[in-house]
């Protein structure tokens, strides 16, 4: 696929054409790039079903990918997907390597220092799970145990008891589990893979998004959900700081998808229920 970043004389020529042929050039660098190249580059995870994953046709698919494709469509752009590590995405300072993250990211205070969150697009419960052979029946049964989470995720922050979610409409939560050991992994799937090896083999339990756990169970993983949700996450589209025009455009599109039912339809398609409201 063609490189999105124009260089040298080509960049100068493109800028000159934009300024002379368009009566209203876009002020924001990211928005300008997306609208001029007609390409929106998404950072995504190929191993995070049902949010984002490689399907049987070796194509990226899932709820998050569907949302991103619709955002690109409403911008009049094609969607390009890259797959950097989660920690790199949440660190900000993307440098134009990608334009947007539709990756079920919680807009925490720490992340807001390096990223902007134009719009919340759905909410999801965070749940504890154990191997199906475990005697655990409640979250309290995991006190003092080895619990796996994805590194840099809100689930790790929850277990460290320093999770801050200050997005509007976030339900209150309490810290009900004190892990004996917190083991971090690159993705939630890696956590599930270790838990499936047996009760206590490598992990005693995990904390992840309930839809992710449900998808694993549907695919034959020998795990089960225990207790009530630990907390509910508002999940937002994220963009790099420094382009308020791009943020405003994304917010406008996502709000429109809420209003016309597009997000609800995508949620029902992938989760079997409407997760686009905290009600």
Image (cartoon, grey):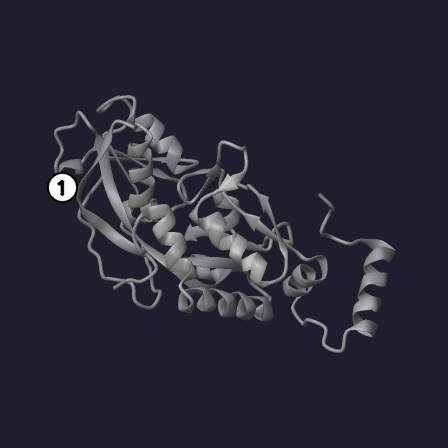
Q: Is residue 79 or residue 85 the one in the foreground?
A: 79
Tell me: residue 200, above or below residue 97.
above
Residue at horizontal 42 percent and vertical 67 percent from the top: 260
Residue 220 lies, in percent from the top left, at 30, 27
Quadrant of the frame with the C terminus: bottom left
Residue picked out by circle 1: 140
Q: Judge from the rendering whether residue 16 lies leftward or rightward of residue 27; answer left or right.
A: right
Residue at horizontal 67 percent and vertical 63 percent from the top: 35
Whether residue 106 is visible to the viewer of this picture, yes or no, is no
Residue 247 lies, in percent from the top left, at 54, 67
Whether residue 227 is visible to the viewer of this picture, yes or no, is yes
Q: Judge from the rendering whether residue 110 lies leftward or rightward of residue 137; answer left or right.
A: right
Q: Is residue 203 or residue 16 the one in the foreground?
A: 16
**Local secondary structure at mark 1:** helix
Tell me: residue 229, above or below residue 137.
below
Q: Is residue 62 or residue 228 the one in the foreground?
A: 62
Residue at horizontal 24 percent and vertical 62 percent from the top: 171
Residue 115 lies, in percent from the top left, at 50, 59
Quadrant of the frame with the N terminus: top right
Residue at horizontal 49 percent and vertical 31 percent from the top: 56
Instruction: Identify the image quadrant of residue 49.
Output: top left
Q: Is residue 9 or residue 110 the one in the foreground?
A: 9
Q: Judge from the rendering whether residue 57 lies leftward or rightward of residue 146; answer left or right.
A: right
Instruction: Identify the image quadrant of residue 210.
Output: top left
């Amino acid at each position: 696929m063609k490189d999105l970043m124009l260089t040298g004389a080509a960049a100068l020529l493109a800028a000159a054409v934009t300024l002379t042929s368009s009566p209203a050039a876009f002020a924001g660098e990211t928005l300008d790039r997306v609208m001029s190249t007609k390409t929106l580059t998404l950072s995504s995870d190929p191993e995070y079903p049902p949010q984002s994953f490689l399907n049987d046709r070796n194509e990226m698919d899932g709820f998050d990918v569907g949302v991103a494709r619709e955002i690109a469509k409403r911008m009049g752009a094609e969607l390009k997907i890259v797959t950097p590590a989660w920690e790199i995405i949440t660190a900000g300072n993307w440098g134009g390597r990608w334009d947007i993250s539709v990756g079920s990211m919680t807009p925490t205070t720490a992340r807001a220092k390096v990223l902007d969150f134009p719009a919340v697009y759905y909410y999801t419960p965070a749940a504890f799970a154990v191997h199906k052979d475990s005697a655990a029946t409640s979250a309290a049964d995991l006190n003092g145990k080895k619990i796996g989470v994805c590194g840099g995720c809100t689930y790790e922050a929850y277990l460290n008891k320093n999770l801050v979610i200050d997005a509007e409409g976030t339900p209150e939560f309490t810290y009900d589990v004190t892990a004996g050991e917190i083991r971090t992994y690159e993705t939630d799937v890696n956590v599930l893979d270790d838990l499936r090896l047996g009760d206590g083999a490598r992990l005693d339990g995990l904390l992840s998004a309930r839809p992710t756990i449900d998808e694993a169970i549907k695919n034959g993983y020998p795990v089960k959900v225990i207790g009530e949700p630990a907390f509910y996450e508002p999940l937002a589209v994220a963009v790099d700081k420094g382009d308020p025009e791009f943020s405003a455009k994304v917010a406008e599109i996502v709000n429109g998808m809420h209003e016309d039912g597009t997000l609800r339809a995508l949620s029902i398609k992938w989760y079997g229920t409407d997760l686009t409201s905290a009600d």
